[in-house]
Image: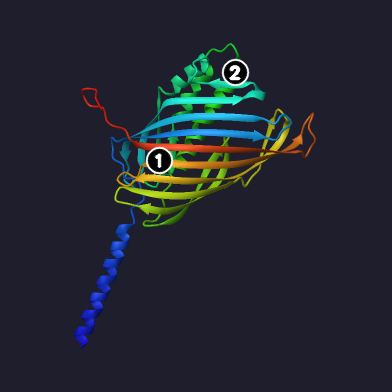
Amino acid sequence: MKHMKSSIILIVLALQFTTAGMAMAQDPPLTYRLHTGDTFFLNVDLQQNTHSESIESEEISFYNVTRIEFRVDSIGPSGRIHMSVKYRDLLISMLAPRMDIDISSSSGKNLMLSKMVDMLEQSAFHMAMTPRGELVDLAGLEEIFAPLASLPAEDTTEQQVILATLEEAYGPYAFKSNCNLFLWIYPVIQPMTNWTNDITYYFNTKAVEMVNRYYLSKSTEKVAVIQGMGMLNSTNEFFETTEMGEVKSAVSGSQTYDFQVDLESGWLNKCNSRQRVIIETTVLKSRYLPTGLRIPSYTETVFEVSGGRVEQTTETGKR
């Protein structure tokens, strides 16, 4: 009888471990599994509209297409992924009628803008990220922007507007934001169906802390669907001098995510995301505005992101 009880206990324990193992196996490992020599891409299609309740009721429309290609150079002992990065097929458009700004790289009318965009696509820069997707090193992107400022220009004011727009769309802060939003999406511990990542998002080059909460809503053998909600709130106010005078501003907002990722590589297949941001600007000192005046502005941004592996070119030049 004693021997029978021991056998039953062993069977029960074996079943428990088997069941736990099956449950563990059903949860996909949410991490990057890239290999040296692989090249992946992200296409980020961004449409943004800003309304400011200033005296002139400013309306700004911004459209931006960014293709980023990531070539895996090496994988470190800790799993850190080192990559060479290039911008491709950039397109940018900004319309702000009251500010007399109307620029578009697709029209071909602004030769300076077209030249600068072409220059951005010529050189590579470098980054390193963890298997979770956390960006831990970025080098060489600032150096790519340096030659743009030295281009000869008849209208230096226009040149500064174009430079500032390109910096905001493709500079180090914009690149870090794209990585934090669309690459750094995996949890610390595996397996996990609910997790939180604290990231930094750069809104108009202002660093804002953001808390992203994710939920693994569905998984198959090939893909996983991850949904998320982000809350952003500047813990510190931003002080700056603008055309209005000396002002301070506070940023708050939210963002939703709907990711589909490839489980073999961990790379993003697609993501639909919508962001709403409120900036409240308070006048501290101005020649023509009352001190203490609060001016809110509302920005809504829609991201449509796709990704995948770049097919390698064969010796015959065919893909």
Residue 262, by quadrant, is top left
Q: Which mark is residue 270?
A: 1
Task: Depth check: give the residue in front, 29 or 76.
Answer: 29
For residue 243, side relative to residue 6 (left or right): right
**Above-or-below relation of 2 to 63:** below
- The location of residue 106, given as percent across then percent down, is 48, 20
State the residue lying farthest toward the bottom: 1
Q: Which residue is mark 2?
A: 158
**From the image, which quarter does the C terminus lie in?**
top left
The residue that appears at 53% across and 19% down in the rendered structure is: 149
The earlier-in-sequence mark between 1 and 2 is: 2
Amino acid type shown at disc 1: Lys
Q: Residues within 10 Å of mark 2 (few under 14, many from 20)?
A: some
- The location of residue 154, given as percent across then percent down, is 58, 11
For residue 280, side relative to residue 272 (left or right): right
The residue that appears at 44% across and 32% down in the rendered structure is: 139
- The location of residue 17, given as percent across then percent down, is 28, 68
Q: Which mark is residue 17?
A: none
Residue 98, by quadrant, is top right
**Above-or-below relation of 218 to 64:** below
Q: Secondary structure at mark 1?
A: strand
**From the image, which quarter does the N terminus lie in?**
bottom left
State the residue lying farthest toward the top: 154
The residue mark sitting in front, 1 or 2, is 1
For residue 22, side relative to residue 167 (left or right): left
Residue 134, by quadrant, is top left
Amino acid type shown at disc 2: Glu
Please tell me how many numbered marks the rendered image carries: 2
